[in-house]
Amino acid sequence: MNVEAKETMNVEAGQKIKFYQTGTLTVGNRLLDEDLRTVQASEERSNAITSGHRACQGCGEALGARYALDAAMRAANGKIIAVNATGCLEVFSTPYPETSWTLPWLHSLFGNAASVASGVAAALRRLGKADIRVVAQGGDGGTTDIGFACLSGMFERNDDVLYLCYDNQGYMNTGVQRSSATPPTARTATTPAVGTAPGNIFGTGKDVPRIAMAHGIPYVATASVADLHDLERKVTNAMQVRGARYIHILVPCPLGWGTVTNATIRVARLATESGLFPLFEAEHGEIVASSPIRRAVPVEDYLKIQSRFAHLFRPTRDDAHLAALQAIADKNIQRYNLLRNDHGNDARKEAA
Amino acid sequence: MKTPIQLTPPKGPVELTLPKARQIEGSRAIAEAVGLCRPQVICAYPITPQTHIVEELSAMVKTGELMDCEFINVESEFAALSVAIGASAAGARAYTATSSQGLLYMAEAVYNASGMQLPIVMTLGNRAIGAPINIWNDHSDAMALRDAGWVLLFAETNQEAIDLHLQAFRLAEELSTPVMVCVDGFILTHAYEEVELPTPEAVDRWLPKFQPRQVLDPAEPITMGALVGPESFSEVRYLAHRKQLRALERIPELSAEFNATFGRNSGGILRTYKTEGAETIVLAMGSINGTIEDAIDELRRNGHAIGAVILTTFRPFPYASVAAALKNASQAIVVEKSLTAGMGGPLAADVTLALANTSTPVYSVIAGLGGRPIPQASLESIFERARDRELPETTFLDLHWDAVNQAITKELSWTPHT
Amino acid sequence: MNKPFATTLDVGSSLANHTGSWRTERPVYVDRMPPCNQACPAGENTQDWLYHAEEGNYRTAWESIVRDNPFPAIMGRACYHPCETSCNRGSLDAAVNIHAVERFLGDRAIALGWNIASSEERSGKKVLVVGAGPSGLSAAYHLTLLGHEVTVVEAGAAPGGMMRFGIPAYRLPRTIIDAEIARIVALGVTIRLNEPVEDIPALLEREGFDAAFVAIGAHLAKRVDIPAPDAGKILDAIGVLRELETGESMPRIGRRVIVYGGGNTALDVARSVRRLGEEAIVVYRRTRDKMPAHEFEVSEALEEGVQFHWLRTVTHMTGESITVEKMTLGPDGFPRGTGEYETIEGDALILALGQNVDTHVLDSIPGVEHSADGVVKVGPNMMTGHKGIFAGGDMVPSERTLTVAIGHGKKAARNIDAYLRGIPYVPKVKPALASFERLNTWYYSDAGKTVQPVLEDVRRRSTFEEVVGGLDETNALFEARRCLSCGNCFECDNCFGVCPDNAVIKLPDSAAIERSDSAGSPHSAPFAIDYDYCKGCGVCAAECPCGAIEMVPEEI
Ligand SMILES: Cc1cc2nc3c(=O)[nH]c(=O)nc-3n(C[C@H](O)[C@H](O)[C@H](O)COP(=O)(O)OP(=O)(O)OC[C@H]3O[C@@H](n4cnc5c(N)ncnc54)[C@H](O)[C@@H]3O)c2cc1C
Ligand SMILES: Cc1ncc(C[n+]2csc(CCOP(=O)(O)OP(=O)(O)O)c2C)c(N)n1
Ligand code: SF4
Ligand code: SF4
Ligand SMILES: [Mg+2]
């Protein structure tokens, strides 16, 4: 190509057209302004968790952790200390003599990540290093169950910690047992798909993001590996605030959910698009934003690609339970007003 | 008169004017001693009889008497020690205190702190463990976690409690290992005794600024708390063992240095009391030694060749020192405030092991469980029976046999419903 | 730091653990065939030039087009754009308005005087092209680029063939034709006008040509016998259109003109008649949806006031009216007479029933064969039965469109080149199709029908001369960016982002770097897989919006 002769777009037209094929739905997009691309699009991302870890193929937790921590690292100019609860993330990342972490990282116990992080934050404050920020992270089990008291204490004291819960809806590291984040009807090793109400029981479980909100802490959000821009924005938002912050991230587990290894992001997307995993943000106990569903799907679309729900379809269709699960989604849709039509990925808005 | 403690250590030589002795509560004394060590993060959860210590500390932080320190009220002992773990790993001097149920509630973190070699100092106000719930003193709590990899020091008096805390921070940070200072609940924690507290300047010279072995720092990131598999776990454990053995060497040295600095002989592995020529030597830990010493004085007056070993360092267990201290005795009596049901006295078991290469018999006296008073007279009568070679292997001091026998009879008569 | 043994580790040490050994499938970057590209009869690399246009690199985009087709401005107006019919975006919301972007680029090239440079290397071979229609001109253009000396001999007074003498000016302004042909001439092609060729072998012999490409089109209007006792005025569509183009003072055709036929030509002539200020009535024997004319032609004609009588055949004509028989459609879709008749007022009848090839020029050439319907048979290499004489465009069996004709010209040029060099022509192996199922359409912004009205507006505003207006730069960019980049990496960074094992590497942004997967097959994606760490989960392939990553089983 003749470079001198290259006829490029006139700046004005280029500026007018804010529409770039995929807008902000993909990780990057060469046509997007640098600052609209994700942290993940950049070769400069910190790779807080680097290659060579032993997570299963297609592990959503490995992905979610890198997404969240890299965003936090960018927001804090690389000054992050991470505290990690016991669980897959910890186990697959740090078998001696190899660690995948590139940031200062500490694992203490299964149930105390929030408290240890409080201690780190207290020390930093005392040592005059408050520019270093603290992130605590754990699986749903380490967060919503065994670590719950420590978490609540950290919230209640409003300690300067960002807590990231990687929710894969079960105790995966110990072989897929039920946690309080396991959805109803899901088959786990301790909620087998047998009996009249196979899988996890309806009416159990807890909604930790809402419980976090009840503490009145400055920031609570849900996020998903299926929406990277949203996730990074939320982590960045959280990092702008001091005090206790909580982000609950859906991270599908191919092993525990019984999905093919390449479906990790797709199944997370369907969780959100079906209404089963609403994405929202809350400040000081009040919801301030939610992400509307972009392409609504029935819960069945989400359920049927996961073998942990196989008993809902085979040998006979369990219409009653399918309807009950749909009702959960419908309730979320109503509660968070998810079916309004103002998602940010519409060219009309981007072109404007 | 509360003098605020400044964080910056004084420069140049300082006059060591010995402060006047003061009559204060043990908990207050411990709190002030801890304060002199300039902890940066204190976290605690209340439990009797530890409460007064942390109440005093919280007040000291709040009033500014103790500066540059975070006092964090947490929701459990598990969180308390966890906060200390985080603070220590981030390079802060961290302290906590607990008792009894609280120690058990934090048990997992107790092992974790030592496994990660974090130099946390913790005061244990010794108390019985339920059920039945009981708030009074014995050593069941310390015994329950005696193998958690911490250095365990027992104070005989409140003065020693003060001194042991000063030594504990030095030892912990020099070796990078957690240290627990055990003080008998109520008997020491709530007792008003005359104590001397050193000046801040003196403590600052004794205890240099905390220089962590490993620290979470973005400038030099590390991974702490890795998963270690069978290929290296034994080595990790062996190194922990070696560190404890090293502590055994360092503890007497520090005690000597402490003596030279503050003019007081406290701490160390053990102390002997009138053991020269003693046929019978009584060994015990903690505040009961005061009573034992009085009993010995009395018996000595009656010509009984009896002495005592006051054991300060219980973990690491000083087998050689114990054996040496008991080497000339023809029998040893271990008086201890704990009972391993189905086994007997755990301290006696350790002492027995220390004397394994000798023919010296070890008698176990279980006393003071759940706060039962240990009268000097009862001890004297036990020691006299020992002199007369009438002591059974294990004695339960002042046990109400009628109550026990009734319960046994009742239990034996129980038959299952058919 | 004097770190404790084993429990405290140096960061990043897991890089020593090569998890690539877990893999049973490997992701491989591929360039697939986008459906638009596959559908383009001229073989334009549509997705490629849209890619450059998206970035605003219009010159690069235009250069990509003219590698295959010398007429972007014409294509952007008159091509029936089968690319858009097969465009994957059509299954999402609405096909990319490919032709509009192409027109934008073509017009820009004309406005800015962009030219094409021919290769310096000359073969010394001479090629004769008979007919300066799109096919002949395309062949001449490509042959020149390939280094041969080309002379086009044309019977008519101006080059362009049916582009000029068939397609009305309101669809294709003559300035555009002139400009794009001028560029071909500037390349070094000689065009001789007003010179009907009668004896091709003799011309070859006389002027020392080494080969010939014949593209004389199909110009003989098909006729049906319609009784017209009162000497009603019966004309043929091609003749009328040619007359419109050449005749300075065109005689009035009629007041109410009946056009008989349902193809594009019928509509062109009807709409031309409207522009002359007369009434135009199209009579067609089948239904609207069965008309061979494109739907846009029908609807634009309706908008312009052309009347339609569907399911009618003309049986009779007087000076004032025609008689038609009503038809019904049989189950086979063919019309059947009902025996019912009606009359339609009209004073002229234009037959638009298709064209035949005037084969007489070829009849005497030994070896040249014709099919039953008169077209000339050619082999897969476009050569007639006579060695060295090739043919293409409307005169050979195939669809009769500009783009097919241009594609024939290109294909023939490559074969003639091989023939002249005495080597076999081996076409490139086409990659597998980037079908809709291969895409992950979640990632594309919603930009469907909502943008169309903007385009419609532009159209509506500019119906004065040319019915359909061009896009301004903003709209052209927008349209280009609607392209899904089917089967070809467009650097959205998804793979780079979604890999749970950080096993995707960005390659340096340099053309010098040869991009290939480890199997060695080249690809255009500026990424590579780090097979040391890739566990083969396939998330990158699943989340690639455009299907440019393929999972290939590992040989274990
Ligand atoms: C009214 C009408 C509208 C159309 N609209 C479209 C459209 O919108 N889009 C589209 O894609 N297609 C359209 N077509 C079809 C398209 O024009 C033809 O398919 C295309 O032009 C064929 O190109 P060609 O080069 O094979 O023949 P032509 O375009 O017919 O060119 C043949 C040339 O050869 C010359 N010639 C003939 N005999 C001799 C000879 N003996 N010696 C020298 N020269 C000779 C002729 O004068 C002519 O210039 C339309 C056709 C018609 C009739
Ligand atoms: C006190 C304690 N109880 C139980 C365990 C065993 N354990 C380790 S990881 C784990 C499950 C972790 O589940 P979760 O927190 O959801 O993380 P995941 O592995 O699913 O990512 C369990 C039960 C433990 N390590 N410590
Ligand atoms: S079990 Fe699930 S969460 Fe754990 S590493 Fe495997 S995929 Fe990830
Ligand atoms: S979306 Fe783009 S690449 Fe795909 S068929 Fe349409 S124009 Fe071609
Ligand atoms: Mg989990």
Image (cartoon, rainbow, N blue to C red):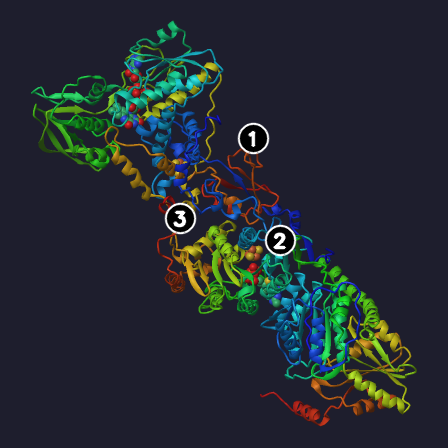
The quadrant of the rendering that contains the N terminus of chain B is bottom right
Within 10 Å of the Cα at label 1, are there few (<14), some (14-19), or many (20+) other Cα atoms? few
Percent position of residue C77, x then y: 31, 29
Residue B247 locus on image (x, y percent): 79, 67
Q: Secondary structure at mark 3?
A: loop
User: Could you tell me which chain the residue with mark 2 belongs to?
Assistant: A
Q: Amino acid at mark 1?
A: Ala
The amino acid type found where label 2 is placed reads: Leu
Check the image and report above or below for C179 versus B352: above
**Residue annotated with mark 1:** C512
Tell me the amino acid under the disc marked 3. Answer: Asn
> Mark 1 and mark 2, same subunit?
no
Q: Nearer the viewer, residue B92 or C276?
A: B92
In the visual, does C163 lie left or right of A54? left
Quadrant of the image where one finds ligand 1: top left
Q: Which mark is residue A345?
A: 3
Q: Residue furthest bottom?
A: B402
Is residue B46 visible in this depiction of the protein?
A: yes
Above or below: residue A336 compared with residue B339? above
Task: Report how far apart the C-alphas of labels 1 and 2 lie in the structure.
Answer: 35 Å
Query: For residue A103, which numbered disc appears in the image?
Result: 2
The answer to whether residue C101 is left or right of residue B211 is left
Quarter containing the C terminus of chain B: bottom right
Q: Position of residue A5 (x, y in %)?
A: 46, 26
What distance separates the C-alpha of mark 2 from that of mark 3? 34 Å
Give the answer, above or below, for where A279 lies relative to C437: below
Which chain is indicated by disc 3? A
**Which mark, residue B296?**
none
Near mark 2 (Cα within 10 A), the count class, few <14, some 14-19 or many ≥20, is: many
